[in-house]
Amino acid sequence: MTMSLNLFTSEPTNSSASLIENFRPNSEVAEKLFIPAFSFKSISNLISFDDIGIIKIDVEGAELEVIKSLLEPIKLYRPIIVLEILPVYNEANNFRLDRQKEIEQIFRRINYVIHRIAKNGDKFSSLSKIDAIGIHSNLTQCDYVVAPEEIVLSN
């Protein structure tokens, strides 16, 4: 499958690009690139594995699509998931808020617990169990560890 990657700046190292249409509704698209994108299901027969212990997701707004494409292996293998979910910023951003709430519902449905990673500068400080990601604008609070409820990560 080919998807359109929207670049919001012409700087090649800028990380604000997204595959999700309207992810940055107030930003002008500077350039579109067409890139190959594969679901886990479409490539899993090319990979040899017995177990999945950890999944890292950092996809600039496409977390929901990635989680949905990995839902069966997540339910089967119960890996720990490390992911970044960019802030909603305010309650008027319904698009991001709805997507974030759907991610939270998926994890609750499969008995996973969300923990926010606290940092001191660029260094890990602690994990805090949270009930909801919530509405915030703090870019230092975008990283999460999501784990099966049977794995205790924090109080």
Image (cartoon, grey):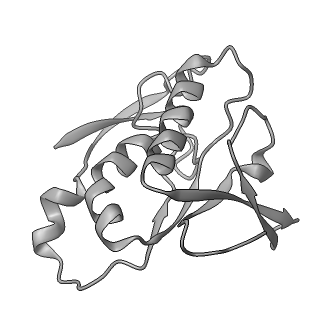
- Looking at the image, residue 121 sits to the left or right of residue 25; the answer is right
Total number of numbered labels? 0
Which x, y percent locates residue 4? 31, 34
Which x, y percent locates residue 40? 23, 59
Q: Report the front residue among 67 and 148.
A: 148
Which x, y percent locates residue 30? 49, 27
**What residue is shown at x 67% (from left), y 57% (from top)?**
143
Q: Which residue lies furthest to the top in this view?
A: 92
**What residue is shown at x 16% (from left), y 64% (from top)?**
43
**Residue 48, above or below 76:** below
Which x, y percent locates residue 50? 23, 86
Q: Can residue 17 be seen in this view?
A: no
**Residue 27, above or below 101:** above
**What residue is shown at x 23% (from left), y 53% (from top)?**
39
- Looking at the image, residue 73 sits to the left or right of residue 18; the answer is left
- Looking at the image, residue 137 sits to the left or right of residue 64; the answer is right
**What residue is shown at x 55% (from left), y 66% (from top)?**
149
**Residue 51, above or below 86:** below
User: In the rendered image, which quarter contains the C terminus?
Assistant: bottom right
